[in-house]
Amino acid sequence: MAGFLNSVRRRLNLAPGANSGSGDPVVDELRTALSPDRVRYDGAERSLLSRDASVFEGGVSGPVCYPVNTAEVQAIMRIALKHKRNVVPRGAGTGLAGGAIPLGAPIVVTVTKMNAVIEVDTADRIAWVEPGVVNLDLTRQLQRSGFHFAPDPSSQQVCTIGGNVANNSGGPHCLAYGVTNAHVQAIEVVLPSGDVVILGGTDAEPAGLDLRGAFVGSEGTLGIATKIAVTITPDPPAVKTLLLSFETIRGAAETVSQIIAAGMVPAALEVMDQRITQAVEEYVHAGYPTDAGAVLLAEVDGLAESIELDATKIAEIGRANNAIEVRVAADDTERAALWKGRKTAFGAVAQIAPDYYLHDTVVPRSQLADVLEKIYAIADRHELLVMNVFHAGDGNLHPLLVFDGREEGVIDRVHAAGAEIVRVSLDAGGVLSGEHGIGVEKQEYMDEFFTADDLTHQNRLRQAFDPGCRTNPGKVIPRGHSCADIQALNRVPKGVWA
Amino acid sequence: MSVSLQVTDRVLLDFAVEVGETGLVAVKGNGTRWDMGGPLASDTRVISAPTGIVNYVPDEMTATVRCGTTVEELHGELATKGQRTGLPERGGTVGGALAVGENSLHVLGRGRVREVALQVRYVSDDGKVITGGGPTVKNVTGFDLPRLMVGSLGTLGLLAEVILRTNPVPACTRWLRSETIDPFMVNSIVLRPSCVLWDGTSTWIELEDHPGAVDAEQGRLAAVATVEEVAGPPELPANRWSLSPSALRDTNVFGDGPWVASIGVGTVWAARPQPARAQDAGVAALSLAVKEQFDRAGRLNPGRTAGVV
């Protein structure tokens, strides 16, 4: 990353530290508190960090800080408080809902240099990590110990555990193991006041309110996590991965619904439609059938004596739903290939069109097939290509609208189709987001899911942590229900559905 | 329109009217943990939460239940479809179990109570029905108010109705006892015991899975120690402690009298109460700020403080 940033600076003729704080009075104080090289104010850096992995543009970053420890984060918060400046925490910037986009030129606090695995205790099954630790790096470090970190979002090769905490991230294997909240025991947090607290605890039943639980998934609006105690999970002794292919996506969706109804909770149940399996095969040759209407990846893990029975039952349910093929991965190599295909699906889409908009809603599992049919109809009506690859086991849909942004009017059609997708999900008894969060993307839909009184209560939680509403303002809670200073944010990113 | 947008259930609205907008008020379930959190202010009006299982959808593994319903009644209904929840079965109500937040004895197998609630509906300090969370098994829509309500002892809102995550009951449950096994080795011999208890002499192990898998796990234990099948767990002393799992090795701290420790969890049931755990001043201040935001007149379960035994 540093090399890339330097090349950008060279092209723009910006030496490191250029524009050194001119026009922003807090920069000198931040540089004194951290070090000059870890407080950036040059245009290249601020421009890069004005975006995240979402489609939204137009964020405006103030000074960009790279703290290396809790004391430096605390110093940043106190300087921000003194100057009444807003602060936006940031991990790897892989969020898809615009949660890390800086609004109104706040101080951006990037935690990527706080990337140490502080302590691993296999007896208590816990690891203390800094927020900048990359999700997959923790599992890699644990590899020889027989443990892993269970949340496995598709971006796990780059996303940080601090970001996972902010978004309460999921992933394919969260079906059986639970999302991030279930794997976080305690969090050291620098509050907007600059005070440092530890929320939760590593004992059996930490005393007091579950402020830990409230903090996880708060999208960086309640403070900045500086240390996180996560649960580490024993590697299962046996794993079986099945690939089931179907003529139609309805066959795959109904198989998923019936597996759950049969009283099984497999480790993962992932569905991909034909459009995405064809793209993946072109891209990584995962071994998916390209002539099937849909593919279901089902994984069971645990004791060998147990998973054999579950795998047999899943295969039977698939065949009862007219599966074309039921294949069990023969070895770890084939299993890895099947998962590589699933986890690189979004990258494979680049072969089809230069842009995509990935949605994230959840519907009851029994509604999957009907909602998917409606999503295909919505895309057809808006003359868009939609691909579906999703966490079917927990009803978490990820419709992928694929387009070329250079085509005139296409962005409007993408947004219109996206709005309809959200509404059919809500009509089916679903929710706005399963794992991407609200960010700026779905703020204005919150009114369609919660009452004004519900949102007032969410804002009460926010204000207890952050009375000045200075930490990641303008996110999650929609205008009209949130802190007054959101009204004062003078710039809303382009593309936000306001 | 979303299923959770407007509350129209007359039972919940009547409960909100009963809570009202003024005066001290508390909800009592079956009173199994009634003294937890400190003494209730003497002039508090004590009411009951509404009862009844509203909607059980076994195919979705969710159940909507009013909070005055007993856990026993709920689990009885779920058992007809081979399911259960992670709530403890100790004679209380669903609302009481969530408000207290104590985990089930079987927490290793069934998960923590704080993970059970998908959606909460509670009555606020100003008598309104508030919804937090959502009806699906996965959801990050807005701040996680269900997590905040669990263990809050009704000091932030009075629980009226919840949607709970249900789980399948394994085909086979078996309790084993051994006097020769190292209790701290059990979790490395078997994969996912639902409970491991130790009283300093005997170790009790609960295995849950398919029968063949339970047999295999029992065989692995029998290869290193003498184990016998027993009817269930031992009697538990009255006082509940919370420690880290590795702190259980120092049994001197439990004092004289019987004790039973939950290995891999950190819960201890002992004859004497756990010494008071000091709360960090910063966390206490933050907790007070939350309380003041949610209960501005201090009328909900007055006298109680979450975390005070």
Image (spheres, coloured by chain):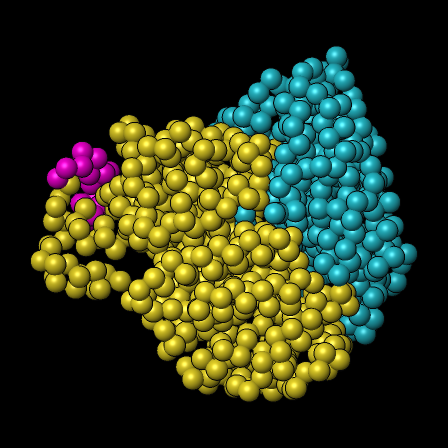
Q: Nearer the viewer, residue B210 or B188?
A: B210
Quadrant in the picture for the N terminus of chain A? bottom left
Front residue of B176/A303: it is A303
Q: Is residue A222 above or below residue A258?
A: above
Colour of chain A, in one word, is yellow
Where does residue A470 sit, x and y in percent of width and height?
36, 34
Name the side, left or right, on which B285 lies relative to A66.
right
- Single out the residue that lies furthest toward the top: B43
Q: Measuring 72% from the left and 48% from the top, which residue is drawn there? A: B164
Q: Residue at x 55, y 34 (%)?
A: A452
Say whether residue A191 is left or right of residue B75: left
Residue B172 coordinates in the image, percent (x, y): 84, 65
Q: Is residue A122 visible?
A: no
Location of residue B154 with respect to A145 vertically, above or below:
above
- Rendered image quadrant of residue A21: top left
Mark yes or no: residue B31 visible: yes
Q: Nearer the viewer, residue A380 or B230?
A: A380
Q: Nearer the viewer, residue A449 or B158?
A: A449
Question: In the image, residue A376 lies at what x, y percent?
Answer: 54, 69
State left or right for residue A16 relative to residue A386.
left
- Residue lying furthest front: A381
Query: Image height check: is A94 above or below B288?
Result: below
Q: Position of residue A284 (x, y in %)?
A: 43, 82
Which quadrant is the C terminus of chain A positioned in? Answer: top left
Q: Is residue A487 magenta?
A: no
- Which stretch appears magenta? A22-40
Give me the chain that's cyan: B
Tell me what residue is drawn at x 47 percent, y 49 percent: A442
Q: Residue at x 47, y 58 (%)?
A: A418
Q: Is residue A30 magenta?
A: yes
Q: Residue furthest right?
A: B231
